Image (spheres, rainbow, N blue to C red):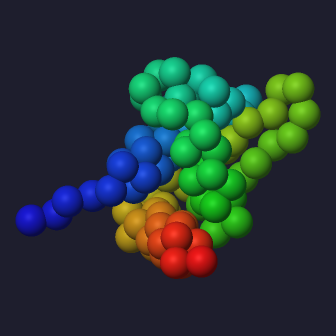
Amino acid sequence: MLDPSKKLVYAVESVVDIAYNSGAEPVRSREIAIRQGVPHRYLEQVMQRLVQAGVLRGVRGPRGGYLLARERRRITLGQIARVVREIENLDNSHEDD
């Protein structure tokens, strides 16, 4: 049985939220955190990694936030899961220090 981590759930919820709520304007991570009931500090870490992986596109500035980096149908759960697994592996390796 699949037992997804909290970070994976947060990441998937965030990408779906952006797909649903973005138009021409980027979606702010604070808005996503409020809508999804997700802790902002975890969310921001995940969002930055999704940008690095090419799933999301970050927009800087006062009207900034996040947009999907490509069409919704071209983003897979597997891509998101790989990004989260990398984060979790880094977190676990820092615990060993």
Q: Is residue 64 left or right of residue 28?
A: right
Q: Is residue 97 above or below residue 83?
A: below
Q: Is residue 5 left or right of residue 29?
A: left
Which residue is at a point 76% across and 48% down the rendered structure image? 58
Where is residue 44 shown, x and y percent of the image? 64, 44
Kindly tell me whether residue 90 is visible in this rendering. no
> Can I make out residue 82 in this image?
yes
Looking at the rendering, in which quadrant would you find the N terminus? Answer: bottom left
Q: Residue at x 53, y 29 (%)?
A: 33
Q: Considering only vertical position in the picture, is 61 above or below 2?
A: above
Percent from the top left, x then y, of residue 54?
66, 65
Q: Depth check: 74 or 62 in front? A: 62
Residue 71, by quadrant, is bottom right
In this rendering, the answer to whether 78 lies above or below 32 is: below
Seen at 61% across and 40% down, the residue is 41
Give residue 94's quadrant in the image. Answer: bottom right
Q: Quarter-wise, where is residue 21 in the image?
A: top right
Residue 62 at x, y percent in the picture:
88, 26
All told, the count of numbered labels is 0
Quadrant location of the C terminus in the rendered image: bottom right
Q: Tell me where residue 9 appears, x and y as whole percent.
A: 36, 48
